[in-house]
Amino acid sequence: MRIEHDIKLGFKDVMIRPKRSTLKSRSQVTLERDYKFLNSKTNWKGIPIMAANMDTVGTFEMALVLAEHHLFTAIHKHYSTEQWNAFLNAAPKNITDYMAISTGTGKNDTKKLKTVFDNHPELKFICIDVANGYSEHFVNFVQQTREQYPDKVIIAGNVVTGEMVEQLLLSGADIVKVGIGPGSVCTTRVKTGVGYPQLSAIIECADAAHGLGGHIISDGGCATPGDVAKAFGAGADFVMLGGMFAGHTESGGELITRNGEQYKQFYGMSSATAMDKYVGGVAEYRASEGKTVEVPYKGDVKTTLQDILGGLRSTCTYVGAERLKELTKRTTFIRVAEQENLVYGG
Ligand code: 5GP
């Protein structure tokens, strides 16, 4: 047994120090980024914020709206091949620049992935998603997927440490998804004691990835637009959001009306709710590692989107970053013992 004594930080432990700036207005800030991915050698341009591949968030309806604004959606893995056909046959052509097809590492997952790609070679992104990205089986799967799809952009995760980011990039991933336990409906840290504070995970993993020419996604733990700005400030190339995109018209999950108030169901992909729905319940050898909650209905996601992008532009003006690309090098985090003033509620 060993103890690491240097402190690891989450979003709530820091703020961004303002800096002298020549920017007059947040309208001068560009949030679009241009990336060239390490192994697929593909170029991408857009605003690097992503809807999570959860069935209540990463829906086709969400992708249509986010793509209009050049944001990305990791589509959840539970759509059938028929649903993929129906959607892609009717969707605008450029939608495939802003969406990934998600997959697990099982035999059926591989088969379905192949069928969807056979029908739709225009799809460009694959998101290989497992709760624990440290297993040898997962690394082998990433390697095989790279061999099978040399030109596709491969997203792989989740991990939280630099050495595993390097291993996944060297095994064929273009973008590594970073985050174990920070999610709003995640109970991994409670059920297993395993995790890593997200801000430190981003800083360490971004450093490892950028050293090799790879990219990372900060996945989970953002509860406010300020957190999204901190994730980019720490070095994330993309930021993935679950809870912040839940509860909208475009989100999945049942709309519930109670005492005149409307709510939408939101749950973790390892929650008992998700396992009941897709695999006939929680298997005997495992515990559920996700919560099921009801989120107050927030209307169309477009309004939330403006709130997030407006906040991020404002962060950039506070530190004098004319482009999102400059945010990391203009970020100085200060460690804090307080965040917002809660006199009138959170
Ligand atoms: P959020 O933005 O809501 O804080 O976090 C979203 C992320 O939480 C997802 O992208 C995914 O990585 C993670 N997540 C989703 N469902 C579950 C779950 O049931 N258990 C765990 N441990 N993590 C989950």
Image: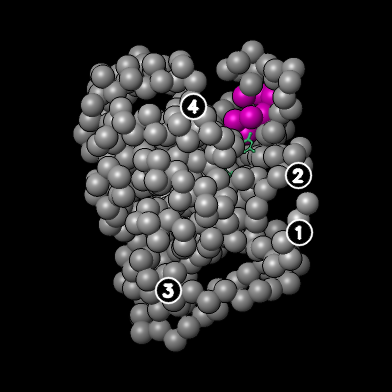
Question: Which residue has dot 2 on it?
Answer: 193
Residue type beneath disc 3? Lys
- Coloring basis for residues: one colour
Contact check, label 3 and label 2, Cβ < 8 Å: no
In the image, which residues are magenta? 265-274
Q: In which quarter of the image is the C terminus?
A: bottom right
Contact check, label 2 and label 4, Cβ < 8 Å: no
- Disc nearer the start of the sequence (3/2): 2
Q: SS for tag 3?
A: loop
Rate crowding at label 4 as few (under 14), some (14 to 19) or many (20 or more) other CA atoms within 10 Å: some
Q: Which residue is drawn at 27% across and 42% down?
A: 40
Residue type beneath disc 4? Gly
Q: Residue at x 26, y 19 (%)?
A: 118
Question: Which residue has dot 4 on it?
Answer: 104
Contact check, label 1 and label 4, Cβ < 8 Å: no
- Disc nearer the start of the sequence (1/3): 1
> Percent x, y for residue 217?
46, 50
Q: SS for tag 1?
A: loop
Which numbered tag is attached to residue 3?
A: 1
Magenta highlight on residue 271? yes
Nearer to me, 302 or 291: 291
Q: Residue at x 40, y 84 (%)?
A: 21
Q: Marks 3 and 2, Cα distance to the nearest angstrom?
A: 33 Å
Q: Marks 1 and 3, Cα distance to the nearest angstrom?
A: 31 Å
- Disc nearer the start of the sequence (4/3): 4
Which mark is in front, 3 or 2?
A: 2
Which numbered tag is attached to residue 179?
A: none
Nearer to me, 125 or 253: 125
Question: Which residue has dot 3 on it?
Answer: 329
In the image, taking residue 15 as reference, residue 90 lies left or right, namely left
Contact check, label 1 and label 3, Cβ < 8 Å: no
